[in-house]
């Protein structure tokens, strides 16, 4: 059995309508698996370039930092992409 990094066993998955149960619900309404993968990769690269400017090499992260980074990245993805994607 092949396990993907996003596979979570559940009977109540909430997929984006029209995605053929390939894309989880998302704020942008993206239905295409290839597009969501491409956008995630693009934004991970962007975040990877931006985050080092926020913390120095000796910084010790805590759980609040991790939550803040996750929130920042998710919010930035939404703000950055919402004008560039045709929402349906």
Image: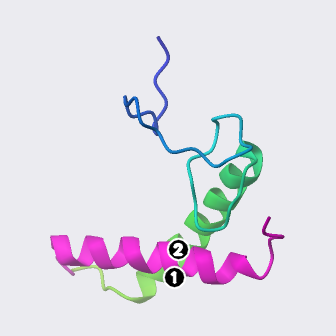
Q: Quadrant of the C terminus?
A: bottom right
Give the alpha-carbon distance from disc 1 to disc 2, as whole Å.
5 Å
- Badge 2 marks a residue whose secondary structure is helix
Q: Which residues are magenta?
A: 59-88
Q: Are marks 1 and 2 in contact (CB under 8 Å)?
A: yes
- Badge 1 marks a residue whose secondary structure is helix
The answer to whether residue 29 is left or right of residue 83 is: left
The answer to whether residue 52 is left or right of residue 50 is: left
Q: Quadrant of residue 28?
A: bottom right
Q: Residue at x 40, y 29 (%)?
A: 11
- Using the image as rendered, state which of residue 46 and residue 17 is in the foreground: 17
- Local packing at callout 2 (Cα closer than 10 Å; few below 14, some 14-19, many 20+) is some
Q: Residue at x 60, y 76 (%)?
A: 78
Q: Which residue is mark 2?
A: 47
Q: Residue at x 63, y 49 (%)?
A: 16
The answer to whether residue 4 is left or right of residue 67 is: right
Q: Which residue is mark 1?
A: 50
- Using the image as rendered, state which of residue 60 and residue 86 is in the foreground: 86
Q: Quadrant of residue 71?
A: bottom left
Q: Residue 61: in sight, yes or no?
A: no
The answer to whether residue 75 is left or right of residue 62 is: right
As displayed, is residue 31 above or below residue 42?
A: above
Q: Residue furthest right?
A: 86
As displayed, is residue 17 above or below residue 45?
A: above
């Amino acid at each position: 059995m092949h396990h993907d990094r996003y596979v979570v066993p559940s009977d109540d998955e909430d997929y984006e309508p029209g995605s053929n149960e390939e894309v989880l619900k998302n704020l942008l309404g993206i239905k295409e698996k290839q597009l969501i993968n491409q956008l995630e990769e693009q934004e991970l690269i962007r975040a990877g370039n931006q985050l080092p400017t926020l913390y120095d090499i000796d910084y010790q992260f805590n759980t609040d930092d991790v939550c803040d980074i996750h929130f920042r990245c998710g919010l930035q993805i939404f703000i950055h992409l919402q004008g560039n994607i045709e929402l349906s």
